[in-house]
Image: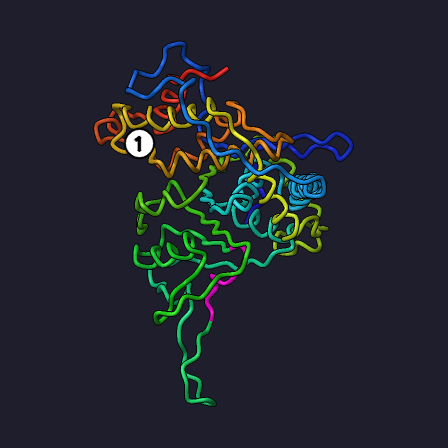
């Protein structure tokens, strides 16, 4: 296990800066001057306005500010164990704020597992890890009924899914039947065993990891399950400066398996997450920005290189992540920059290339960037 990273070190406490958006995908280009082709949709000035978000009371606003400071402090705390990784930490926090799940993709040794463990410790929430293997059964995750000799009855034994943050390590190494056992947990926040629904703890998040370069003996996630992940965060290899810091820490005796020795402490908790959830729901979005999100989704559906564009669920996911990002940056409204900052991490894994486009070396990221660039930015 390593503690490498892909971003610069956290800012000093006396000069806080906002964390970078979850990234790893190609950057979006500047907005293209041409408009998206007409499709019969009414012009922006006649579009129905979204339902206004509830305003926060003064007490709730104070709680919102405290929660934001606490959650932004999480990335500084994680930095004691992981070099950089601000973007990935931001992605996990955004998913917790909008009740979503995150897919972490990177080659072995870029601190995917360590990052999840460090975030859970900094948030004072419970975490469990499941190593997905070809012989893993659904009951190994959700739990099963076990015969109790003392009572002569079957009792339910909870599986590792009964936690706050479930690390599904190498999720693409287990067959589809076992992968699908997470679907109900991810969508309904419950599991059904022997016909009885059993609610999961709150908060609940699945952080799944997968290796993007090794395909032998793997089972790629189907599109329907990829669509259940709110964000896909790509963790590339670190720059030289970060890798030197990793070596320096290990030479000084750092043990990635002992977070207490690294000085990690809980700087936020479930109450801060709950306050943040309520604050994010109060973030407003103008009709023009809502239309911008819809037009981006529709642009992907007409892209000639794609066989599958963004569904309405993907558009609502982009709305949710944009609101969370706006709140983390101290705003009570969503801007087009918030949408563009989260577009790649929110949408890229929901797209499928046509076979001929793959043969030509076209990437999903470049097609999505082109679609975003084709939509005029509202002013």
Nearer-the-camera pick, 308 or 62: 62
Q: Residue at x 41, y 79 (%)?
A: 146
305 relative to 375 in the view: left or right: left
**Which residue is located at x 60 percent, y 34 percent?**
327
In terms of depth relative to the viewer, which is nearer, 30 or 293? 293
In the image as oriented, which residue stretches furthest toward the right?
14
| Residue 241 appears in view | no
Instruction: Give x and y (percent) for residue 59.
Output: 72, 43
Q: Which residues are magenta?
A: 158-165
The correct choice, above or below, for 223 with respect to 22 in the image is: below
Q: Residue at x 61, y 37 (%)?
A: 55
**Which residue in the structure is indicated by mark 1?**
309
Percent position of residue 143, x then y: 42, 68
Question: In this rendering, would 326 be left or right of 213?
Answer: right
Q: Position of residue 75 (x, y in %)?
A: 64, 41
Q: Position of residue 37 (x, y in %)?
A: 30, 16
For label 1, the crowd category at 10 Å Cα-Cα, with few meaning under 14, some 14 to 19 and many 20 or more, is: many
Q: Is residue 228 above or below residue 36?
A: below
Q: Is 374 covered by the magenta stretch?
A: no
Instruction: Identify whether 278 is placed above or below 13.
Output: below
Mark 1 lies on a secondary structure that is loop
Which quadrant of the view contains residue 248?
A: top right
Q: Residue at x 31, y 32 (%)?
A: 309
Tell me, yes or no, if residue 90 can be seen here: yes
Main secondary structure along the magenta-highlighted residues: loop
Scheme of colours in the image: rainbow
Name the residue nearer the viewer: 195 or 42: 42
């Amino acid at each position: 296990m390593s503690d490498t990273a892909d971003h610069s070190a956290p800012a000093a406490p006396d000069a806080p800066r906002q964390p970078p958006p979850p990234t790893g995908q190609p950057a979006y280009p500047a907005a293209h001057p041409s408009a998206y082709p007409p499709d019969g949709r009414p012009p922006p000035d006649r579009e129905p306005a979204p339902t206004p978000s509830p305003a926060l009371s003064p007490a709730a606003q104070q709680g919102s500010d405290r929660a934001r400071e606490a959650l932004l402090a999480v990335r500084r705390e994680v930095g004691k164990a992981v070099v950089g990784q601000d973007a990935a930490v931001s992605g996990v926090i955004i998913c917790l704020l909008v009740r979503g799940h995150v897919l972490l993709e990177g080659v072995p040794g870029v601190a995917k597992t360590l990052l999840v463990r460090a975030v859970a410790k900094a948030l004072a929430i419970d975490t469990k890890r499941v190593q997905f293997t070809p012989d893993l059964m659904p009951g190994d995750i959700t739990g099963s009924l076990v015969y109790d000799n003392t009572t002569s009855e079957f009792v339910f034994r909870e599986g590792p899914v009964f936690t706050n943050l479930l690390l599904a390590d190498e999720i693409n190494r287990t067959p589809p039947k076992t992968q699908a056992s997470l679907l109900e947990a991810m969508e309904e926040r419950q599991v059904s065993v022997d016909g009885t629904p059993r609610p999961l703890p709150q908060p609940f998040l699945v952080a799944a990891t997968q290796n993007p370069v090794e395909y032998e003996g793997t089972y790629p996630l189907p599109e329907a399950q990829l669509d259940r992940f709110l964000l896909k965060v790509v963790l590339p290899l670190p720059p030289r400066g970060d890798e030197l810091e990793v070596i320096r820490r290990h030479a000084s005796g750092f043990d990635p398996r002992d977070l207490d020795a690294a000085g990690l402490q809980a700087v936020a908790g479930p109450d801060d997450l709950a306050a943040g959830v309520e604050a994010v729901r109060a973030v407003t979005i103008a009709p023009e920005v809502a239309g911008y999100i819809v037009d981006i989704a529709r642009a992907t559906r007409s892209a000639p290189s794609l066989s599958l564009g963004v569904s309405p669920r993907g558009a609502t996911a982009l709305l949710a992540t944009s609101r969370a990002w706006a709140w983390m940056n101290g705003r009570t409204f969503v801007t087009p920059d918030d949408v563009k900052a989260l577009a790649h991490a929110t949408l890229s894994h929901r797209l499928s290339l046509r076979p001929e486009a793959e043969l030509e070396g076209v990437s999903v990221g470049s097609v999505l960037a082109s679609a975003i660039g084709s939509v005029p930015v509202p002013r």
